[in-house]
Amino acid sequence: MRTQVGIVGAGPAGLTLGRLLELQGIETVIFEARSREYCEHRIRAGVLEQRVADLLREAGVGARMDAEGIPHGGIHLQFAGERHHLDFEELIGRGIMIYGQTEVVKDLTAARLESGLPIHFETPVESVDPETGVIRYAGGELECDVIAGCDGFHGVCRGAVPARMFEREYPFGWLGILAQVAPSMDELVYAHHERGFALLSLRSPQLSRYYVQVAHDEDVAHWPDERVWDELRARTALDGWELHDGPVLEKGVTGMRSYVGEPMQHGRLYLAGDAAHIVPPTGAKGLNLAVNDVRILAEAIVDGGLEHYSGQCLRRVWRAEHFSWWMTTMLHRLPGGDPFDEQLQLSQLRYLTTSETAARSLAGNYTGIETV
Ligand code: RFL
Ligand code: PHB
């Protein structure tokens, strides 16, 4: 058995790569450890950069996103009892699209199945050989010109690249809920509060996605719904505004880390997305970086220049690493931090909401820098 490009993992990176290569007439086979059902219901990111939304449209998988996604022109920053709007459209002429990762994955999976192309669910890859291009999975082997390692942080491909690792762990995490209630705000709210960070986001006009900062190893069992709502209310309170609650459909804790492995390639193996790098979710960059990697990988497979793949990706990766780290350290209560740290955070937030130059820098990074 052989193919041109063997893709390990059917997350956003693997599925988008499969689609981009399909449009260029290149043969691919996708292996995914989990079931289709599992992949389509794993709740993660919700913010697409405009350039990522454009890429999905150009790849012919943007119709439902355009019908059901919600374009946003900015975000709110809340601190010291005030809520400030940053108008991205006005600042830099670009916005973001609110559309869940679950929906992106559903659209790409449906498109692939409709094209009748091979995607093997519940088929974990056991090992990959960067020298020969062989993928070994339960029950067989596949020989590939190129292997795309799109199997996330806990996959097998990462370990097959001898890489220098850059890492930072944060001593906190996020407890996230998906609630069946109309969002209480028009655009996302990032809130700095002495009790800890909170984020108000959404998935649709009927579904709210809210987060509170908790300990990195927090047990969700300690967070009955009422406690989550009380904490959200305390951290986002504003005169004349109310947070509406509703049935909680999902609840979970996510740890936070920054990670980059360099280089992102070895022999015939090319890593993309979370397999190569992780950002804390505060900058909403994880999914966007994954799509950007495979855009570059698809171009290099088609036009040549694969030797430059890693270097090209890493420029954007490190910009996003810095932005995500900066947003994270500016907005969270830092365990072990002192009043000096807090004053620096508040000063930075005040600067962002009073200086157009500072606001434009955040807006550019959040919506996706054009050239890095
Ligand atoms: P994914 O989505 O992890 O997909 C990897 C796929 O590979 C499969 N796999 C294997 N398949 C075959 N053989 C093996 N041996 C395999 N091992 C693993 C997995 O089952 C999976 O289907 O990586 P990808 O495609 O690179 O996409 C990246 C994004 O998913 C990720 O960056 C973001 O979701 C990060 N992230 C978030 N980003 C945001 O911007 N906002 C968020 O709110 C947000 N929440 C999250 C997140 C990541 C999380 N993880 C990884 C723990 C919440 C969580 C829980
Ligand atoms: C989300 O909607 O899940 C979300 C939005 C913005 C972030 C992180 C997560 O920075």
Image (cartoon, rainbow, N blue to C red):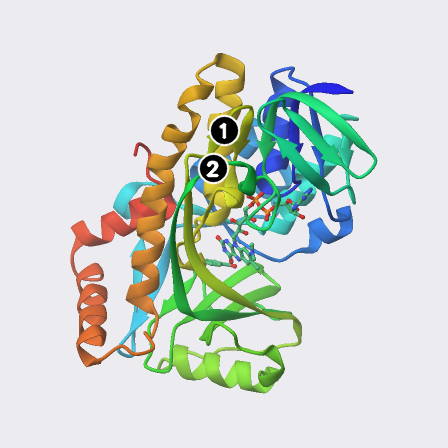
Tell me the distance, in whole angstroms, between the alpha carbons under discs 1 and 2. 7 Å
Q: Quadrant of the C terminus?
A: top left
Q: Label 1 crowding class (10 Å Cα cut-off): few <14, some 14-19, many 20+?
A: some
- Is 152 positioned to the left or the right of 79 in the image? right
Rendering coords of residue 107 (x, y %): 67, 40
- Would residue 272 be visible to someone looking at this image? yes
Residue 313's image quarter? top left
State the residue at coordinates (80%, 31%). Answer: 140
What type is the residue that disc 2 sits on? Pro
Question: Is 29 situated above or below 276?
Answer: above
State the residue at coordinates (31%, 61%). Answer: 85
Nearer the N terminus, badge 1 or badge 2? Answer: 2
Q: Do the residues under discs 1 and 2 have CB atoms within 8 angstroms? A: yes
- Would residue 61 be visible to someone looking at this image? no
346 or 263: nearer the viewer? 263
Q: Which residue is mark 2?
A: 162
Question: Is 66 situated above or below 197?
Answer: above
Rendering coords of residue 257 (x, y %): 43, 59
Q: Residue 266 shows which numbered tag?
A: 1
User: In terms of secondary structure, where does tag 2 sit?
Assistant: loop
Residue 64's image quarter? top right
Q: Quadrant of the N terminus?
A: top right
Question: Is 100 situated above or below 3?
Answer: below
State the residue at coordinates (58%, 83%). Answer: 223
Rendering coords of residue 197 (x, y %): 39, 73
Q: Residue 305 shows which numbered tag?
A: none
- Is 17 positioned to the left or the right of 161 in the image? right
